[in-house]
Image (cartoon, helix red, strand yellow):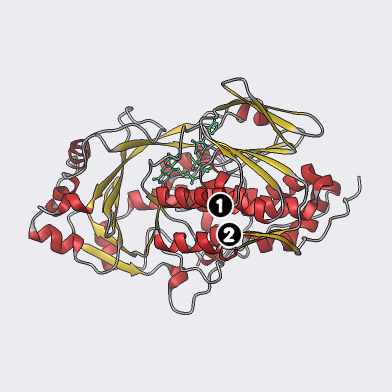
Amino acid sequence: MTVPEVSQAPNATTTVVDGVHRLQPTGISILIVGGGIAGLTLANEAWRQGHDVRVLERSPELDVIGDTFGILPPALVTLRHFPSLLQEFEATSYDALFSFYSHVGRKLLGVGEAPWNQPGAKHAAEGVRVPWIRSRYGLVAALEGQVRRLGIPIEYGKNVISYAEDGTKAAVQTDEGRVYHGDLVVAADGVGTKSHKHVLGSVARPISSGAAAYRGMIPISRLKDISDDAKKRYLSSDRPEFRVYLAGRMHMNVIITPDFVNYVLTHEDSGSADEAWRSTLPGSAVLKMIDAVPGWDPALKEIIAQTPEKSVVDWKLLWRNPQPQWSSRLGRVLQLGDSAHSFLPTSGNGATQAMEDALSLATCLALGGKDNIVESVKTHVRLRFERVSALQRFGFVNRQTLHNINVEEFEKNPAIVPMKMSRWIWTHDPVQYAHDNFSKALASIVNGAEFENTNLPTGFKYEPWTIEEELAREEQGLGSTLYSTGDWS
Ligand SMILES: Cc1cc2nc3c(=O)[nH]c(=O)nc-3n(C[C@H](O)[C@H](O)[C@H](O)COP(=O)(O)OP(=O)(O)OC[C@H]3O[C@@H](n4cnc5c(N)ncnc54)[C@H](O)[C@@H]3O)c2cc1C
């Protein structure tokens, strides 16, 4: 087989809607299952790059559940092309300063600005101030607003239960028996995706990590009557804060903003946690859990005690081995975001990689054109898998480091920062990368030509890995070999 002739990226604008310049139509129809972070990002970017898009979402309406997460610059490289979305994005972000604390309330290290916002740093998202922290709901609402303003059809209450395809198109069926088609179907339906059976032939079983995370949000209005000491130490900063509290095999992220305090406590799973954003517990469950380690800062406990009733999510942290097969046998069904690769929160990368996937896919499809959809899908996976897999492992190693850190040693030598966000992660531009590498990666698929990804640390030799191997090394007291090649500075 020869490498198909690849059309150059179309750059002539044909339409402008809401200030977004749409590139030449490609005639490719994409049916997106899941209106979460990956699905909505793909909808907007695919529309901009000239594809025809439609979104099906299971929730009956825009979901207001969720607290905060980080979005790194590579996810935002095309945000400047969406002027009203850019404005909303900036209005809903929390430009926090980052620091480490011991659980008794002593500050160990002030890291300060995100590395990409430090003087002299140049990140991938031109013209965008990228903060550490973002409200998940704020982002979903902003992305969905953009989808609506562009006139992209989005249907709520559509629970997709099965996938099918032939040589020319793919289809899904909802639990109401309705069938929808597209030249390509993208399963962006999160960790519980219904696409595994079609794509992999079986449902991929997640592995329990033995840990879960309590996630709570307290509106600032509920903190009027806390002690002066708690107000002074937690609510007096003129910048939002992102603090990580270390407590042996537990750690708690505390995010303090003018609107709310959000905490995420990673703790041992007693078996009651669920991989769902809906389980609800009282704040007292969190207080009981942290008391297993004596000495937690009383001021922080005072704040946690103000958590609204039954509002804490107990999110089970499950591991899934990296799996390289994101597309179906005939290449017309593709997994995107969490459905292809879930992340531990300690990677700081789950939402970012989901958005990078979306930008890469829209670009590969535009470069390949309507006649080469299947090849473009495979090329996209070739460009993405190793980067994503390395970052999944990075999240795993961060978790090990955080839970094994000796606080006294860390205090004496803060250079051993337990979570490093290396340059290669935040300088990557997934759209430019697809433009620069599409033809070479495609040739490697079509005729086995040599191709090496460069969206990894310089000098890094990608090696397949499994959770079982990492755990076995941990049990033997050996560190991960992740950092043994490549520049991770
Ligand atoms: C309600 C909710 C709240 C969240 N809150 C947080 C948070 O506070 N912090 C954090 O770090 N991460 C949160 N996450 C997870 C985070 O959004 C993802 O890990 C990450 O952003 C990757 O995005 P994704 O689009 O792949 O998956 P998701 O953002 O999980 O999106 C998947 C979407 O697919 C929809 N869907 C699922 N099954 C079907 C189906 N059968 N048919 C149609 N649609 C379907 C879901 O309703 C959801 O909208 C949340 C996820 C959800 C669904």
User: Is 368 left or right of 242, judged from the image as shown?
Assistant: right
- How many C-alpha atoms fall within 10 Å of the one at disc 2: few (<14), some, or many (≥20)? few
User: Is 205 left or right of 406, judged from the image as shown?
Assistant: right
Q: Position of residue 179 (x, y in %)?
A: 66, 26
- In the displayed structure, 29 sits above or below 199; it is below
Residue 295 seen from this side:
no
Residue 412 seen from this side:
yes
Disc 1 residue lies near ligand 1 with CB under 8 A: no
Q: Quadrant of residue 55?
A: top right
Amino acid at the residue labelled 2? Asp
Q: What residue do we see at 51% from left, 61% from top?
A: 84
Q: Name the residue under label 1.
A: 149
Q: Mark 2 points at which residue?
A: 18
Q: Where is residue 422 in the image (x, y as percent from the top left)?
A: 50, 64
Which residue occupies the foreground of this view, 283 or 18? Answer: 18
Which residue occupies the foreground of this view, 31 or 188? Answer: 31
Which residue occupies the foreground of this view, 472 or 124? Answer: 124
